[in-house]
Amino acid sequence: MDLHYYVIQPLISSIKTGNICHDCLLIILALFCLTFISKVSAYAMEILQHRMRAVSLRPLTASYTIDVVVNTLESEYTTFRMQVPEEYLGIVHHIHTSDINIRSARQIPSQSVKSTAHLDELVNYFITTKTDLIISPDIHLFVKQMQESSSSSVGNSSSDKSSEKYHYQITLFSRELTFKQLKAAISDWTMAYQNYMKHKNKGASYHFTFLPSTGSLLQNARVEFDKHHFSTSKSFDNLFYEGKQSLLQRLDFFLQNPQYYKQRGIAHSMGLMFYGEPGCGKTSTIKAIAAYTGRHLVEIPLSRIRSCDELKRAFYLNSYDTIDLNFSDKIIVFEDIDCMSNVIKRRSTTSSSSSSSSSSDSITSDTDDVTIRLQQEDLDKREKKLSKQYLRNLIGSDSYSIVQDPLTLSFLLNLIDGIIEQPSRILIMTTNHPDQIDPALIRPGRIDFKQEFKRCSKPIIKDMIEHFFAKKCDVDVTQLHDYIYSPADVVSACMSATDGQSTVELLMEQQSRNINVKIEQKIVS
């Protein structure tokens, strides 16, 4: 039935005041009222039909609940954390690709990008609709906000900041499907989201850094990594140091001959140790190897590891924020390992340092007591000031964090070349002080190739200058001394010069200044 024909036509015919302006105004007003009533009626019918579909006398045959929590607490001591299950992301991705209208949503706070979960723009929101949502013919979705987002100030210091918490409970239910069928549908949506992310990340390189856990240690607790896109201009073509060709040959042999290792019963893994002064190319070479092999970088600072179990889970982890990586897809890096932990120091050095630091504070697992050593100045003042940061580090931010399984050297050694093999694994350690590393950690079998990064020899300086100015030049480097300049020094001189010869002159000036400083130091001493 066409209401416009049966209502509007008689209405127009009846509106005849004799005044054309009045007639036009009345007709426009009548059309507006009828259109508005029609739209409201259609919307009401839609709501009524939705309610009728949602309400059924049949009992539920299956339901599944997912909790989505974002805690944006930020202070001097804590960082943002998100608990967004991948199943939820799969559901949101399904809703988006199926073009289902969710009516209302809330964007996940932008601060949460500091968390380990880097959400795609298609799924970076909470579903907040207050009515049941039909996301497939037999599956409904219901959202319940467990706690209103609240802002509160944490701590009394000026460095403490506010916190917000968002907690949504997503329930999927069906009156037709069994629980197994409902769970299978959710798994299919999750897999579709994973495939979408894999396709999106295909060809991209990432740098993952292990994040320290907060609060008490739990067995099999989730380890978290920060993720950043990795791109670099470093390559073996623009790096210059003695031993570069030997490193390249060893790397090529490892990558191209896995059968060689298998036939001889040798684990197909490679351990590299880079040592030398800062600014001589250790980190740059790691970047060049990542670019050369097309692998991702996974950095594990041992100073952040609190137990053997935590290191094992971080070392063998094969999924990083929806990106699956086997050992053949990544390079594990222990950078500046001598600064990370006393665990890897020579055992004689470690024992002496531990005995000398016997006055350190500690928590004993046998009692609830905290032992805090007092210095003489504390006794004189009859007080000892302790920062909040210190106390949190000592007892844990949430509860007493007594490490029952502390990291040990023997565990680290067994992890690197123990029973569980790591096919195609590349492990790189860097240090400024190789003499401080325990020999067991860098023996053959664990470390296959050692590369020293020294200051530049005269031939290396000449190669760097020619590469920088992109031409062969007869620069005279004979007046320069070997092993005085780091690669960073040479590059800095090239950046400040206009050609090769002026670069050499700048280096000579720097050399003269260094000699004068050393002479003055000797005179003073």
Image (cartoon, helix red, strand yellow):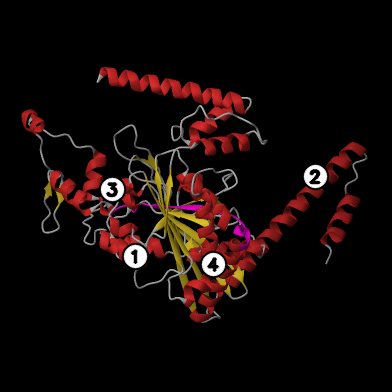
Q: Which circle's residue, 4 or 2, is located before the other in the chain? A: 2
Q: From the image, state whether disc 1 or disc 3 is nearer to you.
A: 3
Residue tagged 4: 141
Magenta residues (range) = 199-215
Residue tagged 2: 29
Is residue 100 in view from this perspective?
no
Three-letter residue code for mark 1: Leu
Is 249 magenta? The answer is: no
Q: Which circle's residue, 1 or 2, is located before the other in the chain? A: 2
Residue 235: % across, % down: 58, 47
Residue tagged 3: 436
Picture residue at 41% right of the left edge, 56% below the top? 224
Q: Which circle's residue, 1 or 4, is located before the other in the chain? A: 4
**Local secondary structure at mark 3:** helix
Residue tagged 1: 415
Distance from disc 2 to disc 3, alpha carbons, whole Å, reads 90 Å
Report the quarter where the N terminus lies. Answer: bottom right
Seen from this angle, which residue lies furthest front?
478
Report the quarter where the C terminus lies. Answer: top left
Is residue 432 in view from this perspective?
yes
Q: From the image, state whether disc 2 or disc 3 is nearer to you.
A: 3
State the count of labels: 4
